[in-house]
Amino acid sequence: MVSQFMHSPLECHVDAILRILRYLNPTPRKSLLFSKNNYFRVEAYTNVDWAGSIIDRRSTSRYCIFVGGNLVTWRSKKQHVVAWSSAEAKFRAMALGMWLKGLLRELQVNLMNPMRLYCDNKAAISIAHNQYNMIELNMLRLIDISLKKRLLVD
């Protein structure tokens, strides 16, 4: 995550970049292998480090997506808001991992089987199965902030 310090890098960030380059230098012939198979299953694996940033306590979402058993994309991205619980942070990571399904729909690719989304948090999975839970959580948060006079609602 050295890219988040590009606007004002310190010596430790430059050292981290040099360490990455030293790792990549001997690997120019390495590649990803895509195998051909008879199934077109889409699977996404998600993870998050809840409140992992020591600077602003925001979580970082991570996902990797496989199509037909082949890794096609992966990402690590800091969440825009501070999550109140690990379940909320994991739910946000799951939502980030769903973008490929929308892309496939735009490309008019019909999936024979539903996309599989893997998460290691039972509470986040429960929220995903009941969309109203997340709406209620957001409403309660809004009411709480409003009552504490940190938000004026007109």
Image (tube, rainbow, N blue to C red):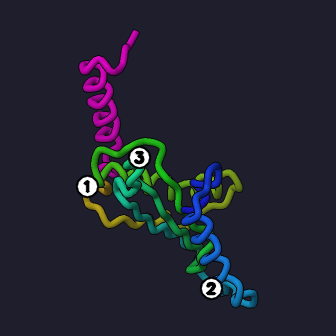
Magenta span has 135? Answer: yes
On the image, numbered disc 3 is attached to which residue? 56
Specify the amino acid type for callout 2.
Asn
Q: Residue at x 32, y 66 (%)?
A: 120
Q: Residues within 10 Å of mark 2 (few under 14, many from 20)?
A: few
Q: What secondary structure do most residues of the magenta stretch adopt?
A: helix
Which comes before the other along the chain, label 2 or label 1? 2
- Residue 124 lies, in percent from the top left, at 31, 54
- Residue 5 lies, in percent from the top left, at 58, 54
Q: Residue at x 41, y 64 (%)?
A: 47
Q: Residues within 10 Å of mark 1 (few under 14, many from 20)?
A: some
Relative to 147, does residue 43 appear above or below in the rendering? below
Q: Are marks 2 and 1 in contact (CB under 8 Å)?
A: no
Magenta region: which residues?
Answer: 127-154
In the picture, the quarter occupied by the C terminus is top left
* Quadrant of the image occupied by residue 41: bottom right
On the image, numbered disc 1 is attached to which residue? 123
- Residue 99 lies, in percent from the top left, at 57, 54
The disc at residue 37 is: 2
Task: Choose mark 2 or mark 1, whichever is in front.
Answer: 1
Residue nearer the viewer, 93 or 79: 79
Task: Choose mark 3 or mark 2, whichever is in front.
Answer: 3
Left or right: 107 in relation to 111: right
- Residue 45 lies, in percent from the top left, at 45, 68
Marks 3 and 2, how far apart at CA: 44 Å
Which comes before the other along the chain, label 3 or label 1? 3
Specify the amino acid type for callout 1.
Ala
Magenta span has 15? Answer: no
In the picture, the quarter occupied by the N terminus is bottom right
